[in-house]
Structures are given as structure tokens and as C-alpha cells.
Amino acid sequence: MPRIDKAAKQLPAHDNVQELTQRANELGKAGTRGNELGIDSHFFRERLGHGQLGRLRGSQSGYDYRQSPEYSDLELVLNQFAEHNTQVLFVIPPVNGRWARYTGLSQSMMQQTVAKIKYQLSSQGFNHVLDLSRDGDEQYFMQDTIHLGWRGWLAVDGAVKPFLEQKQVEPQYNIQNRFLTKTWQQTLSPTGVGVNGRQ
């Protein structure tokens, strides 16, 4: 894979967090020139250039991810992990903070969404969660509006590496069908949910 080989040549010879962080900062700085949102220059030109950016100001102010049938989709995936006794590390990425402010995406709503996801995971025994949701303002953490960037991938690597290298305790999952209900899909606050998925 020539593309992977080319990218690998940019890495230091040894796994060194300081060197990797310095390299991530260099690549991030070079990759995000020309825009105030800290977004990859190519992505910015192709997706947000040509007058597109101005039309997107405040465009996400009405977004709300707390209510969705996708919470039950997540539950179907969790059912499969539990059925096969699979130990899982979940990663909750952030949204680019500057982008969120520009588009009006509510950070309060996003944190409530994260709380709902974490509740659904932890209450069933899925206890390995890397919550990066508050890191969207860290420089070079994001590559574009919603995808991890140079520093973001270092944070993920810092959690994934020990998770893979260290022996994990056998999981004890407690799958609950209430997470497949429309009640759960529409619940705004996990603390208001009863044992049977009723509010």
C-alpha cells in the first residue's frame, strides 16, 4: 500500500509520545492553513469553499441527537457483542468546537447525548469508554468538522494500545430489552428512565 507506506514515513522511528505529539502538531498546522475553523485545507476548499461556508452559519442550531431510533440500532450491536462475549472499547469522538459554535450546534445537547449513550453502555456492563467529547477545541484534535485529526488519533492510540496489550477481565454483560423500545429512543434524560423503559 503506497499511500500507507508514504504516511508511515512521517512517523518517528520509535513509539515516543512526545515525538508523536510534536509531529501531530506540525502536520496539523500545515494541514489546516487558510481557515479559521481548524479544518483540513483540502476538506475546507472542497466542501466549505465556493460560498458554502456562509450558508452554514447557525445551520445546526436546531439539531438534537437525544431522540433517535439509532439508540435501538446501537442496542442491536450491543446484543451481538454480549452474545459473543466480546470485550469492547467504545470511543466517543468530539465535534470540532469552532465548527459547532459557527453552526450553532448546542454543546449542552451534545453532552446530554453523550450521557445517554454512556448510560446505555454502562448499565449493561460495557465499561470501557473513551469519552473525547469535550476535546473538540483542542488544537489539531479534529481534522474536519466531525472526524478525528492528528492529535485526536494520538488520544485514541493512547487508549487502544493498552486495551489491546493488557489482559482484560471477562465481561459480565446484562442486556436489557428496554433499550430497544421507542420510549428509550425518545427519552431525553437517562435518569428519568425506569427499569422497564418507562418514564
Image (cartoon, helix red, strand yellow):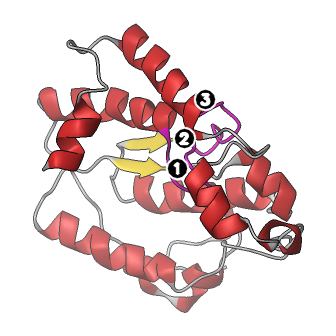
Main secondary structure of the magenta stretch: loop
- What residue appears at the point 41 percent right and 37 percent down from the top-left corner? 153
Q: Quadrant of residue 194?
A: bottom right
Say above or below: 33 vs 95: above
Which range of residues does the magenta coloring cover?
132-149
Label 2 Cα crowd, 10 Å radius (few <14 / some 14-19 / many 20+): some
Closest to the camera, between mark 2 and mark 3, is 3
Residue denoted by label 3: 29
Q: Quadrant of residue 192?
A: bottom right
Callout 1: helix, strand or loop? Answer: loop
Residue denoted by label 2: 132
Residue denoted by label 1: 93
Is residue 172 found left or right of 126 in the rendered image?
Answer: left
Alpha-carbon span between mark 3 and mark 1:
21 Å
Residue type marked 3: Lys
Based on the picture, tell me whether residue 155 belongs to the magenta stretch: no
- What residue appears at the point 40 percent right and 81 percent down from the top-left corner? 73
Alpha-carbon span between mark 1 and mark 2:
5 Å
Residue type marked 2: Leu
Label 3 Cα crowd, 10 Å radius (few <14 / some 14-19 / many 20+): some
Residue type marked 1: Pro
Say above or below: 141 vs 62: above
**Mark sitting earlier along the chain (1/2):** 1
Q: Position of residue 93 (x, y in %)?
A: 52, 49
